[in-house]
Image: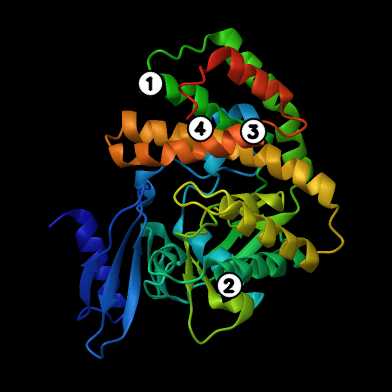
Amino acid sequence: MSDREALRLDFLRSAGLAEAVRAPLPGDASTRRYERLTTPSGATLMLMDQAPAAESRPCDPSWTPEERHAHGWNAIARLSAGRVEAFAAVAAHLKSLGLSAPEIVAVDAPNGLAVIEDFGDALFARVIEDGADPAPLYRAAVEALAVLHAAPTPEVLTGPAGDWPLLTYDQTALQGGADLFVEWLPKLIPSLVFNDDAVAEWRAAWGPITAAGEAGASVMAHRDYHAENLIRLDGRSGAASVGMIDFQDAVTAHPSWDLHSLLQDARRDVSPALEALALDQYFALRPETDREAFMAAYAGLAALNEARILGIFARLIARDGKPRYVAFMPRMWAHLNANLKAPGLEAVAAWMDRHVPEDVRR
């Protein structure tokens, strides 16, 4: 028995769940794993397992950009390092707003373990695949975001595993994400060569977008808000019918971030008509929003996110041997190509024209 398994067993015993039947769930792109627990009574819960040793340190709020780069990827861009105590604190905040986050049943933050409420398997992506009309699901998801965005955004969240700082998705984090593109695309596509001058031009081109993203950071962002992380909860209505999971990387960000994550999804197609409907609904719920300025940021940050995700997919394929992510890349290229036509993105579009052949961008 591994040391990690011994920790899990001790934790489950201490939570009164020693007799629960454990069933591992399929893994994702992270170092986190889940098991469904079925108790002798037939009730189900989830075991979340995020070993702190599997990740570098979270970002310290006091660190300078230079210190963040010295401490590695989590300090640069992921910020929370996926910690269980971050999940617990974000869950408490979401629940305080009447939104649906899993109840924390038991938590051992130092060892990265938690037992949480089981929201079931009705992921938006799966129920849509099974024939559900996507429009009501997306309307509910937008309604939940409007509730979140209307609430004050705390600098520190308080949860059952202690306080957690809600850091800003600032220029360092945004540019760090964009830089995954120039770091990892050449490792997947050796014909791409980005020398130091090209990388410097890349960063300069994104400068206005990252500056606007930091300046507009005003709401809590789930930061991974899409149809694979939202669960339909029957018996709840409106915003509360959206079960949120995998929000441990939440940050203070521009309010467009979760919207473009939802509506320009890497893993499934969202029709232009549904994207337009969802955006119209958001502006109806948040009438004080300057739509023109919002949509300029939406296009810029969506393009940056798509470049970031292309870099992540290239890394998963080239480094981690996960070829299934090849299938998602054309969708991200299509979103990126479309967004690069928006005003304010001319410098990034010109960089792409100089450095990435058209036959790669599809």
Can you give x and y, in whole percent of width and height, for residue 357 in the image?
51, 17
Dot 1 alpha-carbon crowd within 10 angstroms: few under 14, some 14 to 19, many 20 or more: some
Query: Which one is closest to the eye, mark 1 or mark 4?
Result: 1
Query: Which one is closest to the eye, mark 3 or mark 4?
Result: 3
Query: Which one is closest to the eye, mark 3 or mark 2?
Result: 2
Give the Cα distance between marks 1 and 2: 41 Å
Tag 1 secondary structure: helix
Q: Residue furthest left?
A: 1
Quick one: label 3 or label 4, which is nearer the N terminus?
4
Residue contact at pointers 3 and 1, CB within 8 angstroms: no
Nearest the eye: 201 or 92: 201
Give the Cα distance between marks 2 and 4: 43 Å
- Report the residue marked by disc 2: 136
Relative to 281, residue 250 above or below? above
- Of the residues shown, which amino acid type is indicated by label 4? His
Q: Is residue 40 visible?
A: yes
- Report the residue marked by disc 4: 71
Quick one: label 2 or label 4, which is nearer the N terminus?
4
In-image side of 64 versus 235 (left or right):
right
- Of the residues shown, which amino acid type is indicated by label 2? Pro
